Image (cartoon, coloured by chain):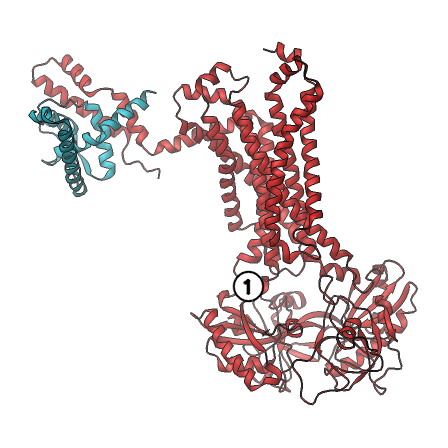
Chain colours: A red, B cyan
Amino acid sequence: MFRRKRKLEDFSAEIEAHLELEIERLQEQGLSEEDARAAARRAFGNITQVKEYFYESGRWLWWDHLLQDVRFGLRMLAKSPGFAALAVLIMALGIGANTAVFSVVNAVLLKPLAYRDPGRIVTLSNFSRTGEAATALSKAVSIPDVQDWHDQSSSFEAMAYYSSGEAAVMSGSSAEYARVTRVSPEFLRVFAIAPILGRFFTAEEMKPGAGGAVLLSYAYWQSHFSGDRGALGQTIRVSGPQPIVGVLPPGFGFPNKTDLWVPLISDSPPRSWQSFLAIARLKPGVSVEPAQTELTLIARRLEQQYPETNKGRTVALTGMRDDMVGDVRPTLYLLLGAVSVVLLIACANTATLLLAKATARTREVAVRVALGASRQRIVRQLVTESLLLALVAGVSGLLLAYGGSKVLVALAPADVPRLADSGVDRWVLAFTLGISMITSLLFGLVPALYASRADLNDALKLGGTRSVMGGRMVRMRGVLVVAEIAFAVVLVSGAGLLIKSFVALHNVALGFRPENVLVMRATAPGPLSEAITHARQFFRSMLSEVARLPGVLAAGATMAPPGNVDSTGFYFVDHMPAQPDPNAPAVILNIVTPGTFAALGIPLKNGRDFDDSDTFDRPFVAVVNEALVRQSFPNQNPLGRTIFCPFDSDKGMTIIGVVGDVRQRGPAKEPLPECYMTYGQHAFNGATLSMVLRTAGDPNTLADTVRWVAREKSPDVPMKFTTMESIVSENVAAPRFRTLLLAIFAGLALCLALAGVYGVMAYAVGQRSKEIGVRMALGASSGSVLRLVLGQGMILTVIGLSLGLASAIATARLLTTMLFRVQPGDPMVYLTVTVLLGVVALLATYVPARRASSIDPLATLRQE
Amino acid sequence: MSTQEARERLELLQGTLDLLILRTLIFGSQHGQGIARAIQQTSRGELLVEHGALYPALQRLEERGWIFAKWGTSSNNRKARFYSLTPAGRKQLAKETTKWKRLATAITRILGSEAEGS
């Protein structure tokens, strides 16, 4: 772009040659040298002008002007540092907030997954065509189904199933929790990776009865074996000692930062056992749709072949990234939308600042126009100035974003995938640069166009003390302020809806009392058969001991504390059908020890709790919740009736008690029917339980004592402590995150709008001080002046409010899925927002109005 | 202000002057002074071209790729920059000539019989 074909010297030489040729010719015609020279010059015209034209037609000029504009712009900004600092601060806030949110969006939604050809990795999940609650609870699949999909399809390069969980792993004499994933033979081929050390499991090792084998994650290898190659061949105790056969590449930890992978061995698993997750890699060139079509056909065949297990079920294929970020996507888009509205407000604000500045510079612009500057040149100069502002703001914004994205990551729910990857990379840099440029045009162009249209004569005549463009400028600023108010209303309304819904979420009756409950999850290590016995002894003696600790009011243990669902199944009342019925009602299954309901504060509505006499050799008993009673025993007494939950046992259980409903899946979800069984008669929780202790004071202070008691008993049992309150809080982490952020953005918007209203009113009062002085001299009272100015401000406010409310109500529908017990059109929210914005705008107008009403008419008139 | 005026004047001349330059070069390469003289001579002195206006026009035509230039020696052994038509320039000349002729015919028709005499 900056290439110039010809140098000015060359051009000059050509002109010189022309003149010489012409002189020679004229001399040949008989003129004297002197006359010939003069005539040649006359014929040529203005040499300087021609050279100037040549220079200006060159492409360097663009660059020259830019440098000139930049230099001039920097000088102008340096001359009014207060203005520059304010504008930079406002824009830096806007750009910084946008960059921070974008860096998270980029990491979570946009960056490709760090696997080879990540677009080809898909998840396969069960999909109930009837949409029944039981199957909708989980997308887990059964092994025979996956095997049939695998064998009958041709779209996939590899297909695997796995199951993942926390397990007790022995290292040395004590045990700790590690994430262990059991995988099928093609697992690594799905990700197209191979161990960096050692090998994958052999076919022998994947067979029932094999001696076991373990693959380590790179991180686990580093932290537990210091990256020693000698780790290969050593044994590690994951339910029994197993040899380490390999280490996977750094960064790989699918799923959920797995530490250890072991072979998934299952001897002829039933088709009804849907407890596994499936993933696959598409063949190159095969897209999701044909693969989905193929699988749908296979699933339909399986439905006909195995109606008792597969009726109504099909399989759904989802790209892996979509599967990972499905829940987070709407929240992130919401934040991106909100934060860009903040940016628009910041732009409007800066534009009003620049308009004021442009008015003050009318005379400067007029002088430059008088000296021959073209309008385009003036506009370019002013836009360069805003570009400079925006770039400085962009760099400051980037610094803000650097801190801001850390705060975002800290505030975000823990289960947001890939959040830790967010940071400033080249995409984020490009984004910041891009929005800086765009915003500079947004806030800079209008003032520049206005300034350049100044009427030369008037501007020069007035001498720049007061602008003739005042009226038009005030109108333009009015428009900007209306926009600011409207945008602020949209954000504040959205935040209001989310806040109201979060409060509702917080106030929802959970069905238990979460305060002052310590939760201790523990797992006995070793092969399952031994571990179950070990766990039974451990929990029994722990419960009897901790119940005697001072400060413990009640103690129990449960497979799934409220907020978690461990197992779901079907139930039958009175008798078990000979054929399994796929349309049986769904139920959440839980195992508890006696005393658990008391410890959690779940009210016993009818009958009795389990007690220590409910053992394996006694009649089986069950406690159900009110939702189950409502569903299966309307207006009947459920006590004494028999319920069948064919999960670990087909034995019928006598219902001995009814407890209140608990929101098992977090505060936002309605309670489902639940059947509690007693630990004395069931063991499908394996070697893991969560002890729940109701304490007199802060439950956290008791954790160390409980840990000490547990270590005394069994040093090899790993434990994790938390409180019921933090489990509940994790359950509402996503709504809290978006509510908090939207509230912050709304606050920011409100402040900017406030500043905007104040600025435009103060400016208008300044412009009209003479007029007001005259009015007062003619007998207007200070009260009527106050009303005049307030009225003007209120007109802007009312227009902004109405536009804002209309857009807010229109956009609130987008929030519907995020609202809890609040309608998008909630009148209270909009009323509150209207009053809030109205009061804020009134305050912002009152100060300048007050100043106007105290104008001394004599002083104003004397100024002239 | 002066630059602006000059630019306007050049723009006014641009189309015509460009055509005349291209037309002149059809007989072979020529330097700026030669072109100026040729235009003056072939128009029998009716067209007075300010020599200075020629150079921006030549520069423009060169940038558009219609003519190309080379430093050479004139008949009386002076260094001069010689311009020649490119194939694109030839095409442009044909186009411009047709356009010009149509314009001239149209104007002649409007002006009527008085104009026809000349």
Say above or below: A111 vs A14: below
Residue with the mark numbered 1: A321
Q: Is residue A775 left or right of residue B53?
A: right
Q: Which residue is drawn at 44% across and 71% down?
A: A286
Residue A706 figure quarter: bottom right
Q: Position of residue A509 (x, y in %)?
A: 79, 61
Amino acid at the residue labelled 1? Arg
Q: Which residue is drawn at 45% across and 26% down?
A: A452
Q: Residue furthest bottom?
A: A578
Residue A478 figure quarter: top right
Label count reads: 1
Residue A245 figure quarter: bottom right
Q: Mark yes or no: residue A193 visible.
A: no
Front-lying residue, A835 or A174: A835
Q: Mark yes or no: residue A2 visible.
A: yes
Say above or below: A170 vs A752: below
Q: Position of residue A220 (x, y in %)?
A: 65, 67
Protein chain holding label 1: A
Front-lying residue, A513 or B60: A513
Kindly state the secondary structure of the residue where label 1 is placed. Answer: helix
- Quadrant the N terminus of chain A occupies: top left
Front-lying residue, A382 or A259: A382
Q: Residue at x 77, y 73 (%)?
A: A630
Q: Which residue is drawn at 69% across and 32% down?
A: A842
Q: Where is residue A379 in the image (x, y as percent from the top left)?
A: 44, 30
